[in-house]
Every structure is written in structure tokens, then in C-alpha cells.
Image (tube, grey):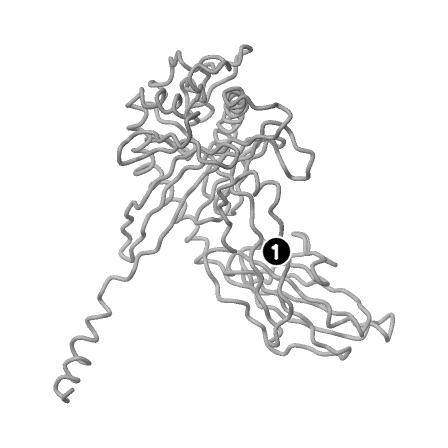
Amino acid sequence: MGLTTIAVFIGVILPSLHGLPRDPERHSLYYIYTALSKTVTAPNIYEFTAMGLLDDRKIDYYNSVDKKKIPQENWMKEKLAADYWTKGTQSRQSKEQWFKVNVNILMERMKQNESDLHVLSWRHGCEIDKYSDGRAQFVSGVDEYNYDGVNFLSFDENEMQWIAAVSEAVPTKRKWDGVPVLNQYTKGYLEKECVGWLEKFMAYAEEELKQASPPEVYLFARVSKFSSDKLSMTCLATGFHPKDIDMSIQRGQTAVVTAEIKDVFPNGDGTHQVRLQVEVPKLEANDYECFINHKTLNAPVVRFWKTDGVEFDESSPIVPIAAGVGVGVLLLVGVVILVVLLVKRKPADRFSNTGTRTIEATAAPAETETLTRGKADNADEMPEEEKKLNGDDKNSGSSKDSGLDIGHASATGSVKTDGSVNSIPNSETSAGSADPSV
């Protein structure tokens, strides 16, 4: 290669490469509802749950015990008016009734024993590509139902029709496809309304992230004031914002002391600090570690004392893994019942030679809630067009199986004494909405 060619490459071609568009970022908004056929005597397992996920990160939550839609992110609480949460709570309460009726319908259709546990779930949402110039391009939409961990029914947005994955879903497919307008609004929701909420939520989250800062972590060890055979070990996290932080001193996988919100104090510059302390025998000091997780971290960080029974101070901050949007990716698991009943925190790795290690974020049950069909003021709200469509649905009939009466969950109603779904004022809309069942 001659000098002239090199000069042209450096002076002309290389600078022009900086102007090439970068690969877009993929973002998603999903909601999943999960209903069990009966209560389970296990901690934190509910008969009905709903969860919203933005980029696999939980942004709201509802369960059948608390019966309240609760924000899981500060920006959700601050940016969305109280009316949003009131309507969302009412909507999920009506969805809870819908699922209760339709789980029973499916069990009857499949001739299943009521003594066994069965699960009906609904997952839907959308994915977009976000470009550096601010453009958002729709990539895909999902609207699917699963029963006992197996695909039951899904929406084909290109063909605008429902796909029955099993023979028992065929009656439902026929019933829902028999209302073409509903399928049109389902497609419109996935490609437009969902994308609108996704972009709105992303903007809220990014605005808060601009003001966020990760914690700096310091470890200290001092001879105890009460016993010369013990060390008083301190873990200090400082300089972080927002205030919420997950921090504990652990021995193995057991938390010895855990930080609470009352333990977090302001620094005076808009950031916060928290410190934890524990006294341990000198010979056991190397067995202890400090676990830190914050929304600015890509993954939790674990620091451990390598004191060998000797006092020490860290003279400089140990900055954890670089800041990122997520605390850690929440795993969406297709077989919902296995996630609900079996997911456990993975055991952490043993210590590395550097004194720092990351551990995988704990998997959480994949649960999501319904999204709006058409133009609405709440992510769970149903549009006027669909309310009109379903407001006089005479096919939302009884719990007897008349062609899988599982009503389309986007329209919710009350349950009458005969098991049918009646039109009621939707909690997120001003008009009534009947529930076309499966």
C-alpha cells in the first residue's frame, strides 16, 4: 500500500466511518399474568400475580393477596399520576376474576381433576429497535396464552388471526377470529400503543438514570473494643443515587446483617451512604463478604475481607462494575409454573484472587399484565373502540364449555353467579366492557 493510499484512508475514509449509523439498541415491554387453579401453601406464591417488565426489569407488580398495583421503580411512582395506579389496580382486580373463571373452564374442557394444580398465563408486549437519532422501529409483538406451561394460543400479527397450538384451543381460535375488529385492534396495540408506552417508560427511566451514580465501596477492619480476639469489620457504600440499595454482610450464602432504608443517610451532595458492621472472630474474618446491588450496576458485586486477622483500611474506593441501565436481567421463563414453584437463587462462586467477584442476578417469576388495545391513557387501559366491540358480548357465557369461553383477557368483566362474565365499568375506562371468554 503506497503512501498516497494510506493518506487518503486516514484523511478521508477513516473520518467518514464515524458518521456511519451504529447498531440500534433493542428494548422491550412485556406484561405477564399468571393464575393458579388453587391456592398453594408456599411463601410468596399467590393464586394470581401480574408483573410489568421493561427491558426484563420489573416496573410494577400485583398479587391476589395485596390486590394493589404497586410501582417497582422510583420513576414509575414519580412520573405517573395516582389515577394511573388506581385504574391499574381496578383493572388487575377484574383480570384476576377473568382468570379465575377461565382456569376452571379449561380444566373442565380438558377433563382434569380439580385436586391437581393448573396454571394459565398470558404474556404480551412488544420489542423495538432504538436508533441513535431517536427513531424507534417496531420489531415484533407477542400476545400468547400458555396452559400448564405449554403454548395454548398465540396471535399472528401478520395474518391477524389466532394460532391454536393444541386441539383444545381450536374453539377459542374460532371464537376470537370470528370478531375481526378485535384482531385488528390487537395488531394495532402491539405495533403502536405498546410501542408508545415503551418509549414513554424508556424516557422516564433514562431521565432518572442521568441523575444516578453507582456506589463506591470501602472495607475496614479494626480490633474489637470488646474482645482482642475479634475484628470489627465495616462495609461502607457511598456516593450512590437513587437511595434504594441492596446491601448485606454475608457468610457464605447467609446474610448476617442487611441494610434497611432507615440505615441510608444523605451525603449532602444529592448522593447517599450506608454502612454495615459486624464483629467476628479473627480466624473467621476471611469467611465474610459484603454484597452490594444498586440499579446503576450491571450485576451485583461482592467484596470480601482478606484480613488474615489483621487490621486494615482501604485508602481508595473500590468502584464496582460499570454503571448500566439494569440491576440485572430478569429471566422470562416459558414454563410459568416451574418458575413460580422452583426458581431459587443460584449459589455464588467462590472468591476470586482479586477480592472481587460478580454473581448472577436472582431469577424472578416471569409475570406480566395486559396492555392496552388502541389509544388509552393507561398502559392497562382498553380503548373506546374495543369497549364498544365487547360491551354487548353475548358469547361470554357460562362456565360450561361452549367453545372455550376463555374470554379475551384484554377486555375484563365481572363474574356472575352462574360463572359467566358480565359487562361492568372497566376500572381503567369510563364505559363498560364485557369479557369474551375462551
- Mark 1 secondary-structure assignment: loop
* Closer-to-camera residue (226/333): 333
Q: Is residue 425 above or below residue 242?
A: above
Instruction: Report the quarter where the C terminus lies.
Output: top left
Count of marks, rendered view: 1
The percent position of residue 194, horizontal first and vertical second, equals 36, 38
At 53% from the left and 39% from the top, the residue drawn is 336
Instruction: Report the quarter where the N terminus lies.
Output: bottom left
Taking the image as shown, residue 4 lies to the left or right of residue 219, namely: left
The percent position of residue 40, horizontal first and vertical second, equals 66, 33
Tell me the quarter of the picture where residue 217 sits.
bottom right
Taking the image as shown, residue 122 lies to the left or right of residue 139, namely: right
* Closer-to-camera residue (345/315): 345
At 61% from the left and 30% from the top, the residue drawn is 117
Q: What amino acid is labelled 1 in the image?
A: Lys
Other-residue count near label 1 (Cα within 10 Å), few / some / many at <14 / 14–19 / ≥20? few
The percent position of residue 241, horizontal first and vertical second, equals 54, 58
Residue farthest to the left, as pictured: 4
Q: Identify the residue under disc 1.
A: 346
Residue farthest to the right, as pictured: 227
The percent position of residue 263, horizontal first and vertical second, equals 68, 56
Taking the image as shown, residue 99 lies to the left or right of residue 138, namely: right
Tell me the quarter of the picture where residue 164 sits.
top left
Q: Is residue 332 above or below residue 105?
A: below
Q: Is residue 325 above or below residue 381?
A: below
At 47% from the left and 44% from the top, the residue drawn is 53
